[in-house]
Image (cartoon, rainbow, N blue to C red):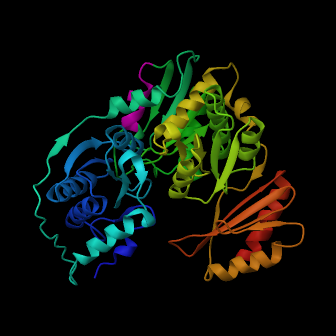
Amino acid sequence: MRDLKQLVKAYDVRGVVPDQWDENLSRAFGAAFVQVTGASAIVVGHDMRPSSPSLSQAFAEGAAGYGADVVLIGLCSTDQLYYASGSLDLPGAMFTASHNPAEYNGIKLCRAGAAPVGQDTGLSEIRELVESWTAADDTVTVPARDVPAGTLSEQDTLRGYADHLLGLVDLTAIRPLKVAVDAGNGMGGHTVPTVFDGLPIDLVPMYFELDGTFPNHEANPLDPKNLVDLQARVREVGADLGLAFDGDADRCFVVDERGEPVSPSAITALVAAREIARARAAGEAEPTIIHNLITSWTVPEVVRELGGKPVRTRVGHSFIKQEMAVTDAVFGGEHSAHYYFRDFWRADTGMLAALHVLAALGGQPGTLSALTAEYDRYAASGEINSTVADQAARTAAVRAAYAVEGTEVDELDGLTVAGPDWWFNLRASNTEPLLRLNVEAEDPARMAELRDGVLAVVRA
């Protein structure tokens, strides 16, 4: 029998099509989503993957069969789906596997107002319901429900999405900028032209053709090899900056005028500074900023310096969004280049973060490297993965070696050990036999020494 626990992850549904799931299973997920959420209407969108149109249509049919009216918004980025969920006040389903290879697809689910649906907020119930409808031979039979069938309608939300974002950042007075954008054949090629239309931007598009087979490179800018083309183009055309979006365009990575990547932690600090200023101007005494525990020490330092309140969380969008709701935070950032905004239903949108960068750069005469230098105060290793046979044993060995007198230790998310001028975090992957290491120190030599020492223990 098909193991749905391999398909339904902590935050979303994701697997290989058709080996792990197909239209029949998607139809069941649509029905289960309606039953668990109690929704009378939902909104459904999809990315450019070859399997996305048929999977999303089947999901919509399953939802309508269980009595929900379905608004189909077609091709969209994940943050465009969040916009639709927020502006229409409807639960939503986005069909995408983000940066995964072409044979994968998935579903990101949310309640009305873009509130997340994860294992603890409905996803496990949806999985259990679909499992109850699945026979031993993997045949899925959705039981009939004695309710009138819902309707299917279509709506274009791209212009509304663009207008909403542009209403949150003042770009009216920026100087002309040359901006290279690598969409990776993903949904950035769909959203960027509309969002940038009318701005004083000389756009240099790269791989804007929607193609879910990813013919040029993986749509995963977190991997440095996928930034190489953008870095070269920025230098070649003399661009002021470069932007790289992942497959579903909810994450954005930034490259400066030299072609050098800008740390997502530096972008978090820059955007946090702007959002703190805006909130304080509106009368908030101490605006809250969320950052996860692998962002740079720079982020909480900048937040405090500007009169904000930094709050540290675990890695993962459900934790960020939950903490934003509890604290009424104005902004949240992760080192993976997910950026969350209170004015965007606390959801993540790489596009809005990109607009903040454009506004900050275009509002002054200097370069992006000069602008971000004050937000990049430490030497960081980036995330380093190690395959291990026993995650707990290797973590315990690192703890024994480094959690000594004079250090601070916490286990909010994995093992974090901090000294006076350094810290590292070691986290176990939930889905693979990996330990993920992030190291930061005041200077590159100290960082390299610490990185190599911890890795030696992890890989012993």
The reply to whether the magenta stretch includes residue 269 is no
Q: Residue drawn 62% across and 28% down?
A: 278
* Image height of 351 relative to 300, above or below: above
Quadrant where the image shows the C terminus: bottom right
* Image height of 240 relative to 82, above or below: above
User: Quarter-wise, where is residue 34 in the image?
Assistant: bottom left
In the rendered image, the residue lying farthest to the right is 406
Q: Is residue 167 left or right of residue 173?
A: left
- Given residues 258 and 61, the one toward you in this image is 61
Q: Is residue 288 left or right of residue 404?
A: left
Specify the segment rendered in magenta: 189-198
The reply to whether the magenta stretch includes residue 193 is yes
Residue 162, image x, y percentages: 40, 30
Quadrant where the image shows the N terminus: bottom left
For the image shown, how many numbered marks are present on the structure? 0
Can see residue 376?
no
Residue 350, image x, y percentages: 50, 41
Residue 178, image x, y percentages: 55, 24
Can see residue 166?
yes
Q: Residue drawn 86% across and 73% down?
A: 404
Q: Is residue 412 left or right of residue 236?
A: right
Q: Residue drawn 43% across and 58% down?
A: 100
- Given residues 224 and 291, the one toward you in this image is 291
Residue 44, image x, y percentages: 28, 48
User: Quarter-wise, where is residue 273 in the image?
Assistant: top right
Q: Magenta region's main secondary structure?
A: helix
